[in-house]
Image (tube, rainbow, N blue to C red):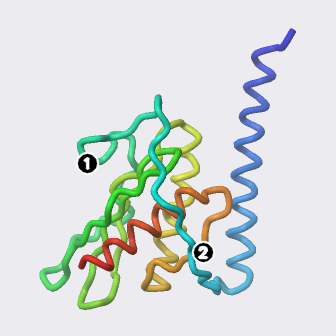
């Protein structure tokens, strides 16, 4: 007989291990001076959402999507460009770039994977890292966040669309 309280601890332990792994990757990157090798991201074709998961078909941001990563309002000389919605197996990813001239000054997540609570946790960790990568690289050629491959690919795809259609 399986004790349900043991399975909760195993789930919590798995989440703790994931968080520790992400912390290790971030710590190693910080210890190396934060230098990024900016490997090109090879994007697969868009993946249809998994049925049964929460998704939006109206184009409106998902209700459980992460809030914008910056509260800095756009200045009169800046403009905002929305990327396409990239469908991943764990939910949609969409970003909005804030540009001043040709410089990316901010990246805001409009939609993030939310098909399950684990998807929301992973996105909450990965999205700030991906934002930082884009701001540093000034391009969609960013490193994939370990443990958030689909989110990273969808993020890069949405950024690239916004850059191409600005």
The image's mark for residue 143 is: 2
The local crowd at label 1, few if under 14, some if 14 to 19, many if 20 or more residues have their Cα within 10 Å, is: few
Q: Is residue 25 above or below residue 75?
A: above
Mark 1 vs 2, N-terminal side: 1
SS at badge 2: loop
Q: Residue furthest left?
A: 76
| Residue 23, picture quadrant | bottom right
Q: Nearer the viewer, residue 69 or 62?
A: 62
Q: Are marks 1 and 2 in contact (CB under 8 Å)?
A: no
Instruction: Say which residue appears at 34% left-offset and 71% top-offset.
Output: 161
> Tag count in the figure?
2
* Image spot of residue 120 (x, y percent): 51, 45
Instruction: Tell whether 10 sits left or right of 62.
Output: right
The local crowd at label 2, few if under 14, some if 14 to 19, many if 20 or more residues have their Cα within 10 Å, is: many
Instruction: Tell whether 7 sits left or right of 145.
Output: right
* Image spot of residue 133 (x, y percent): 52, 77
Q: Residue furthest top?
A: 1
Instruction: Say which residue appears at 69% left-offset and 52% top-offset.
Output: 19
Q: CA distance from mark 1 to mark 2?
A: 27 Å
Instruction: Tell whether 89 sits left or right of 162.
Output: right
| Residue 165, picture quadrant | bottom left
* Image spot of residue 107 (x, y percent): 37, 71
Residue at the spot of label 1:
59
* Image spot of residue 18 (x, y percent): 72, 50
Q: Quadrant of the C terminus?
A: bottom left
Q: Quadrant of the N terminus?
A: top right
SS at badge 1: loop
Instruction: Say which residue appears at 52% left-offset and 57% top-offset.
Output: 151
Instruction: Say which residue appears at 33% left-offset and 79% top-offset.
Output: 163
């Amino acid at each position: 007989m399986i004790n349900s309280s043991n399975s909760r601890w195993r789930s919590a332990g798995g989440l703790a291990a994931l968080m520790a792994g992400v912390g290790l990757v971030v710590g190693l990157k910080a210890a190396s001076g934060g230098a990024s090798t900016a490997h090109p991201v090879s994007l697969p074709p868009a993946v249809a959402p998994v049925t049964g998961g929460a998704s939006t078909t109206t184009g409106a941001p998902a209700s459980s999507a992460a809030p914008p990563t910056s509260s800095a309002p756009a200045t009169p000389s800046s403009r905002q460009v929305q990327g396409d919605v990239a469908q991943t197996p764990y939910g949609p990813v969409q970003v909005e770039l804030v540009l001043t001239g040709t410089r990316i000054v901010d990246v805001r997540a409009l939609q993030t994977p939310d098909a399950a609570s684990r998807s929301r946790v992973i996105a909450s960790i990965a999205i700030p890292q991906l934002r930082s990568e884009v701001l540093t690289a000034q391009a969609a050629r960013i490193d994939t966040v370990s443990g958030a491959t689909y989110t990273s690919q969808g993020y890069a795809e949405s950024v690239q669309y916004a850059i191409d259609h600005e």
